[in-house]
């Protein structure tokens, strides 16, 4: 892995005041940063980086002064050259059901939504974004109606975890009884179009001397970018989730237009070859329930056929509507009947309870409402502002 430094956040401040933020660097980049700033001699850099790593990622400190086993002069040099600042939190919302949502700004125009959902996974899952916007146009997804602003850096992905940990009060990184036990890349964007940053972020998040969330508790969800699946498995050993939503190419092309490029047969054979796939490490298939579109008993049976021999579980996601969306959510009885067929076919098929709907934190609702709220706030402020 290269040792390129991520200076994207530093560009916010004037050149004279640029300080590199160390809190989202990989180990290799951290060593390189210490050496290039001449804060540490090259032969001592690795040892010093290990020490800093523990403070940053195990204790979650945001101030070099808190590093009690680092000499005073060294703390001063570090403070002069670097920062450990968190990004700005523009908005924080807590749902009636305990779901938390943060709108985080890492740079001008780079606003990221991150959602914490309690009681999912072992204890609670953090749904992180990998891009601002998305280049794909899945017809049921609001994010898909928003143009890609840009890929997030590894630091910006890790920052989402750090912000959540700050808010949950989970420093130092607990070994047991965690509230944040799982990470899912199911926020905004297509993670496999940003694999370098996603893989580097997973290296940081999974590191045992830091945040230490095991790779088996990290799930990457993709709409099916076939050529990247092998690399995802090899580089991250993360759990795989596939947004399937249809059992034949004609319908899937309408719902997930990427299917035109990578049809079902190709997708399924890439999934069967996913590194590490086994009964203990099953693929999750996500299937959004759209009334009268993909929810018939015949489609449930077709799904069982399609996935034959793939160690899998199927997550049924009730569709979350958004203004202007052309779909409706299937009736509850239809979803239950669909699940029953999958169960009889041998697949665990939990129905995902919509969480955080009151704060628009549910699947497919991310980002869009924040923009709307901000736009209306802007309008309100404009009308209230005294004429100049
Ligand atoms: N781009 C990736 C990950 C982000 S989307 C992917 O497509 O897999 C995370 C999940 O939310 C996907 O399974 C997606 O299909 C689903 N989703 C998107 N919009 C939704 C909506 N309006 N209602 C329910 N689920 C939705
Ligand atoms: Fe992008 Fe995923 Fe939404 Fe499709 S479902 S538009 S890939 S974020």
Image (cartoon, rainbow, N blue to C red):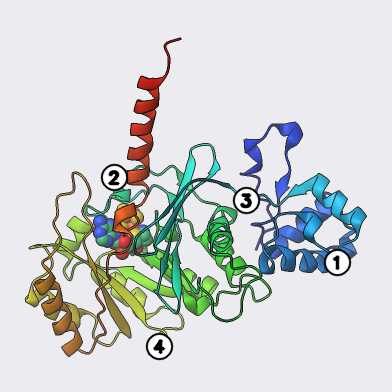
Q: What residue lies at 25% left-to-right and 65% top-to-bottom?
A: 263
Q: Where's residue 64, x and y in %?
A: 78, 55
Whether residue 360 is visible = no
Q: What secondary structure is marked by label 2?
A: helix
Above or below, 205 relative to 310? above
**Foreground of the two, 93 or 36:** 93
Quarter holding residue 65 = bottom right
Tag of residue 145: 2
> Does residue 137 appear left or right of residue 213 in this picture?
left
* Mark in front: 1 vs 2: 1
Q: What secondary structure is marked by label 3?
A: loop
- Quadrant of picture, ligand 1: bottom left
> Does residue 42 appear left or right of residue 92 in this picture?
right
Marked residue nearer the N-terminal end (2 or 4): 2
Please give the residue where the numbered disc 3 appears in the rendered image: 86
Do the CB atoms of the residues marked 4 and 3 lie less than 8 Å apart? no
Whether residue 56 is visible = yes
Above or below, 220 relative to 135? below
Do the CB atoms of the residues marked 1 and 2 lie less than 8 Å apart? no
Marked residue nearer the N-terminal end (1 or 2): 1
Q: Where's residue 320, x and y in %?
A: 23, 57
Please give the residue where the numbered disc 4 appears in the rendered image: 278
**Foreground of the two, 224 or 129:** 129
Q: CA distance from mark 4 to mark 3?
A: 38 Å
Q: CA distance from mark 1 to mark 3?
A: 22 Å
Marked residue nearer the N-terminal end (1 or 3): 1
């Amino acid at each position: 892995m290269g040792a390129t430094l991520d200076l994207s956040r530093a560009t916010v401040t004037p050149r004279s005041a640029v300080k590199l933020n160390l809190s989202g660097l990989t180990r290799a980049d951290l060593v390189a940063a210490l050496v290039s700033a001449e804060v540490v001699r090259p032969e001592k850099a690795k040892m010093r980086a290990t020490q800093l790593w523990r403070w940053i990622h195990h204790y979650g400190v945001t101030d070099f002064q808190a590093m009690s086993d680092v000499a005073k002069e060294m703390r001063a040099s570090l403070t002069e050259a670097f920062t450990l600042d968190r990004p700005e939190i523009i908005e924080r919302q807590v749902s009636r059901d305990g779901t938390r949502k943060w709108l985080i700004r890492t740079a001008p125009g780079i606003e990221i939504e991150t959602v914490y959902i309690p009681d999912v996974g072992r204890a609670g899952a953090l749904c992180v974004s990998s891009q601002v916007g998305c280049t794909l146009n899945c017809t049921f997804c609001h994010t898909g109606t928003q143009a890609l602003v840009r890929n997030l850096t590894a630091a910006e992905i890790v920052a989402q975890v750090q912000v959540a940990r700050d808010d949950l009060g989970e420093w130092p990184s607990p070994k047991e009884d965690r509230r944040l036990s799982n990470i899912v890349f199911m926020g905004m964007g297509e993670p496999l179009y940003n694999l370098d940053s996603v893989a580097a972020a997973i290296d940081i998040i999974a590191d045992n001397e830091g945040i230490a969330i095991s790779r088996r508790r990290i799930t990457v969800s993709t709409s099916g970018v076939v050529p990247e699946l092998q690399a995802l498995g090899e580089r991250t050993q993360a759990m795989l989730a596939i947004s399937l939503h249809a059992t034949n190419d004609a319908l899937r092309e309408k719902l997930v237009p990427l299917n035109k490029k990578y049809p079902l047969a190709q997708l399924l054979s890439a999934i069967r070859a996913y590194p590490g796939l086994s009964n203990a490490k099953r693929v999750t298939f996500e299937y959004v329930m759209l009334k009268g579109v993909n929810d018939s008993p015949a489609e449930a049976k077709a799904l069982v056929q399609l996935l034959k021999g793939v160690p899998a579980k199927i997550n049924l996601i009730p569709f979350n509507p958004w203004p202007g969306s052309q779909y409706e959510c299937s009736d509850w009885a239809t979803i239950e009947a669909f699940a029953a067929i999958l169960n009889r076919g041998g697949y665990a098929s939990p129905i995902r309870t919509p969480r955080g709907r009151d704060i628009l934190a549910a699947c497919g609702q991310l980002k869009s409402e924040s923009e709307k709220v901000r736009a209306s706030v802007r309008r309100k402020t404009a009308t209230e502002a005294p004429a100049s």
